[in-house]
Image: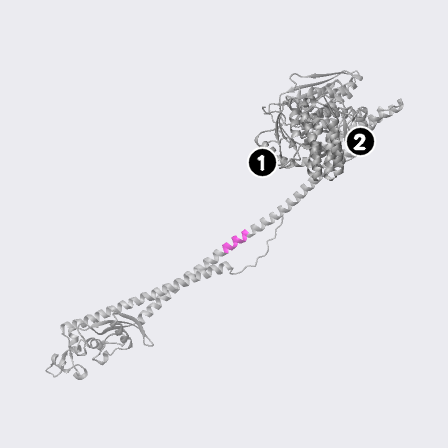
């Protein structure tokens, strides 16, 4: 698989880098801003501290001067001050040289103190007052604002001011009037302790600003370097992320491509599987159709030959008939072999599970062939081993088929001597996994067929069970056969959980053995115990769409004395059946073809068996019976379907057994049954009670539908006889309610027989639809009532 | 004198028969009464019951007559019902039972 990686356009800065870079830059800018702001604040704080120090110094000096009054100064121009001259006079002395020397006025000491050494006006302290005596102490606008603030309680004012070219930090605190002050200012109205003005410090900010600028430059440089390093890191990191992402995308592309390929392959596999399934279904259908199409004419050929054989024939005609009878049978055998092997290989061969008598099966199978052996002067014997179970459950037809093959071969290939068929039980030695060996009733049965015939060459023994194989082509010429018999036998034996093998010596004979797994049965199959019934006089309905088949059946059964009615499809059969039942002469047996043009034979049987009272027997003859056919017939308690063509004798036996099973009632009629009778007519109530007086049955009477439902709820009944026309609720409704009660409480279905005034098909259907199992028409005769109780009651398994 | 109608009935049912036939005699009277009132529904039920019981007791003819009465009542055919009431009375009059 080749994959192409699409060319991706490479960007210098992808979106990831830009995003991270932008965020990083914002963070650095924020950090720089915060740091610069904090630095600015710190420097301003330092300036404020310096200003306070200057203030403290200035104030201390003033206080010292005030308290000691020791500083002297030369008065140049005594009249400069607005203060009274007397004040000056009191503290003024005239030096010998005539200079006027006065103690310094605290009001202008600082100014005077600083002025000689002042370099510039940019730094200094100033004294100012609300009513300045000296012109230099007149407050400027900032000092005026500060003085105003002191009157409202402020103790310190600090702010940055500007004179246009330079910035200053100015600090001012209030001055309170002392005694010294009041010497001059008492006249102005000031009192001791009152705020007289303020002392301020003015600090030029130039030095601080230039220091701040230097530090800011260093900070910015540091941040800038850090920012650049971050950007480089981001670039490298995002490149790595981008590469991993590209790798991941490439991987995902690959996975997607793989998934696509996988999905395509899965689709193709599914399509192939569908094709195979369709082919298998088509094969299966083809096989079924083949079986039907071939067996239908074969049925006619063999059946007609048998019928013709029954007629008056000249010896020559008889010879011809027996020739084509025998040819027909040979052809049928070959066809059966081919169909069987096809079915087994297609996996469509279903095994039947039915009870049968094992030794009887062996004897009957060998009887067919033993005649041929005795005609050739060969001794034939059957040996039954010890502990051979009498009754087993399995597929008797398939066991018979294998036996017929082996015994038939033995007779065919033996010219003198003997043939021995032995049956014995062996414990499971090598159980097949599908066989439940823990089941104690499973047994492995070994069959062996030993002859003194021509034997098999050693080199052919290993291939003898392969399809179309015979020991030599001359064998085929001399003995005939298709070479399929042993191949089919092997497959059938395997299907039955066993193995087949052979030991042989050329010229001395062969011994074929095979095993099958069979389930032991305690009692025979109920159907197999019936004694054959007399067909003479039996009322039989034959249903087949093929006129030739109907003719064969009609002829065969009529010769045996049965009254035969024909129907060409399922619906006609049901109509004919209903009509006969309503006329009071119901059919005892319906012989059904498996494939009918409208509804299948099994469905017809199901509908016919719905009316339990009639207990009609049904027999299915099918060219290709399906698994469902076997299941349905077993569930309906009917005989196992027969595969067409059915030979005359086999048909008569099957019909006879089916009739016997129908005529054997479900009970002897003497077991006690609990019966609920819903009937509103008093005459019928007393009549039914009288009919059952002598019987062992217990009768409960309900006079309307509602009472019937109530009584049904209160106890278990084996049978309910339900009058349809009743007051309050009618029989249909009462039946429906009873069926609902059964469904809700999950109890077994109690048989309900409708008592109706009319014997029409519609009436019958209405009763069955409501949930009845059959219907009796009024007036009720004693025999009919007792028969109904006998056939329809639930089996008496409960304690009475 | 009309020919007697002989019917064989199982001896087991003997004890039921007089009462049952008594009921049918009453049916003749009820029918005629209902006819004068034009009450065909009562007659229909009567016919229906007779049809559903007669044969059970062994009187198949009663089932037949009952069926005809039911039909005539459904058709409200007073003339036919008059005739059937007469037929029923005649049958009951001629009836001779032999218990077997």
- Mark earlier in primary sequence (1, 2): 2
Q: Is residue A244 magenta?
A: yes
Q: Which residue is mark 1?
A: A744
Q: Is residue A265 above or below residue A328?
A: below
The x and y percentages for residue A502 are 70, 22
Q: Point out the frontmost of discs 1 and 2.
A: 1
Q: Is residue A505 above or below residue A620?
A: above
Q: Is residue A353 left or right of residue A162?
A: right
Asked whether residue A339 is in view, the answer is no
Q: Which residue is mark 2?
A: A550
Towards the viewer: A497 or A665: A665
Towards the viewer: A211 or A684: A684
For residue A482, which quarter of the picture?
top right
The x and y percentages for residue A495 are 67, 28
Disc number for residue A39: none
For residue A329, which quarter of the picture?
top right
- The residue at 17%/81% (across/down) is A83
Q: How crowded is the residue under tag 2: few (<14 C-alpha within 10 Å), some, or many (20+)?
A: many
């Amino acid at each position: 698989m080749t994959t192409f990686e699409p060319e991706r356009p490479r960007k210098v800065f992808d979106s990831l880098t830009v995003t991270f870079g932008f965020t990083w830059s914002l963070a650095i800018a924020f950090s720089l801003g915060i740091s610069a702001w904090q630095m600015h604040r710190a420097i301003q704080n330092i300036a404020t501290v310096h200003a306070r120090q200057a203030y403290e110094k200035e104030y201390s000096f003033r206080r010292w001067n005030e308290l000691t009054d020791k500083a002297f100064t030369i008065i140049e121009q005594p009249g400069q001050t607005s203060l009274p001259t007397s004040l000056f006079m009191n503290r003024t002395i005239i030096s010998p040289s005539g200079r006027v020397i006065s103690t310094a006025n605290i009001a202008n000491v600082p100014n005077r103190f600083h002025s000689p050494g002042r370099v510039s006006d940019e730094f200094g302290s100033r004294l100012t007052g609300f009513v300045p005596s000296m012109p230099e102490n007149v407050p400027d606008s900032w000092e005026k604002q500060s003085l105003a603030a002191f009157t409202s309680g402020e103790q310190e004012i600090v702010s940055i001011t500007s004179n246009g070219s330079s910035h200053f930090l100015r600090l001012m605190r209030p001055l309170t009037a002392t005694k010294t002050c009041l010497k001059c200012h008492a006249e102005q109205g000031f009192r001791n302790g009152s705020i007289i003005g303020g002392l301020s410090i003015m600090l030029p900010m130039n030095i601080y600003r230039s220091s701040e600028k230097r530090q800011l430059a260093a900070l910015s440089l540091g941040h800038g370097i850090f920012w650049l390093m971050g950007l480089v890191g981001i670039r490298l990191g995002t490149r790595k992320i981008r590469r991993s992402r590209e790798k991941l995308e490439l991987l995902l592309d690959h996975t997607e491509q793989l998934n696509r390929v996988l999905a395509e392959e899965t689709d193709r596999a599914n399509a192939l599987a569908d094709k195979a399934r369709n082919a298998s279904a088509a094969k299966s259908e083809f096989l079924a159709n083949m079986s039907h199409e071939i067996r239908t004419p074969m049925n006619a050929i063999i059946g007609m030959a048998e019928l013709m054989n029954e007629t008056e024939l000249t010896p020559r005609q008889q010879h011809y008939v027996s020739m084509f009878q025998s040819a027909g049978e040979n052809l049928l055998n070959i066809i059966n072999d081919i169909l069987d092997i096809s079915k087994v290989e297609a996996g469509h061969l279903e095994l039947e599970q039915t009870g049968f008598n094992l030794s009887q099966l062996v004897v009957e199978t060998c009887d067919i062939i033993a005649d041929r052996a005795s005609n050739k002067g060969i001794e034939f014997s059957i040996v039954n081993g010890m502990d051979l179970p009498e009754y087993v459950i399995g597929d008797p037809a398939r066991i018979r088929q294998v036996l017929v093959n082996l015994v038939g071969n033995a007779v065919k290939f033996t010219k003198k001597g003997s043939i021995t068929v032995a049956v014995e039980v062996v414990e499971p030695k090598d159980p097949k996994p599908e066989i439940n060996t823990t089941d104690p009733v499973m047994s492995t049965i070994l069959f062996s067929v030993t002859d003194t015939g021509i034997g098999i060459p050693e080199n052919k023994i290993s291939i003898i069970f392969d399809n179309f194989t015979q020991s030599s082509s001359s064998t085929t010429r001399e003995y005939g056969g298709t070479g399929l018999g042993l191949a089919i036998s092997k497959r059938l034996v395997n299907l039955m959980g066993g193995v087949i093998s052979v030991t042989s010596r050329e010229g001395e004979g062969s011994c074929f053995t095979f095993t099958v797994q069979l389930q032991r049965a305690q009692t025979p199959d109920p159907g197999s115990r019936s004694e054959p019934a007399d067909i003479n006089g039996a009322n039989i309905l034959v249903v087949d769409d093929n006129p030739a088949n109907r003719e064969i059946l009609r002829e065969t059964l009529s010769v045996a004395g049965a009254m035969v009615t024909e129907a060409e499809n399922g619906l006609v059969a049901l109509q004919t059946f209903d009509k006969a039942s309503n006329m009071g002469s119901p059919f005892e047996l319906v012989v059904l073809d498996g494939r009918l043009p409208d509804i299948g034979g099994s469905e017809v049987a199901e509908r016919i068996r719905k009316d339990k009272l009639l207990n009609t027997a049904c027999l299915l003859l099918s060219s290709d019976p399906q698994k469902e056919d076997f299941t349905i017939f077993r569930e309906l308690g009917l005989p196992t379907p027969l595969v067409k063509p059915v030979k005359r004798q086999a048909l008569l036996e099957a019909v006879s057994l089916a009739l016997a099973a129908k005529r054997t009632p479900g009970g002897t009629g003497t077991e006690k049954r609990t019966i609920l009778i819903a009937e509103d007519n008093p005459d019928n109530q007393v009549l039914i009670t009288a009919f059952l007086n002598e019987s062992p049955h217990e009768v409960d009477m309900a006079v309307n539908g509602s009472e019937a439902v109530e009584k049904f709820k209160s106890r278990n009944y084996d049978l309910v006889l339900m009058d349809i026309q009743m007051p309050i609720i009618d029989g249909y409704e009462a039946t429906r309610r009873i069926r609902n009660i059964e469904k809700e409480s999950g109890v077994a279905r109690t048989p309900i027989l409708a008592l109706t005034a009319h014997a029409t098909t519609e009436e019958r259907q209405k009763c069955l639809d409501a949930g009845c199992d059959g219907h009796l028409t009024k007036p009720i005769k004693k025999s009919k009532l007792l028969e109904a109780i006998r056939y329809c009651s639930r089996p008496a398994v409960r304690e009475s | 004198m009309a020919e007697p109608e002989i019917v064989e009935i199982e001896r087991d049912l003997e004890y039921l028969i007089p009462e049952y036939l008594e009921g049918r005699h009453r049916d003749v009277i009820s029918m005629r009464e209902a006819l004068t009132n034009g009450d065909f529904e009562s007659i229909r039920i009567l016919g229906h019951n007779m049809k559903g019981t007669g044969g059970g007791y062994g009187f198949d003819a009663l089932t037949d007559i009952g069926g005809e009465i039911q039909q005539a009542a459904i058709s409200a055919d007073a003339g036919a019902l008059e005739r059937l009431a007469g037929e029923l009375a005649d049958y009951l009059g001629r009836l001779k039972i032999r218990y077997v």
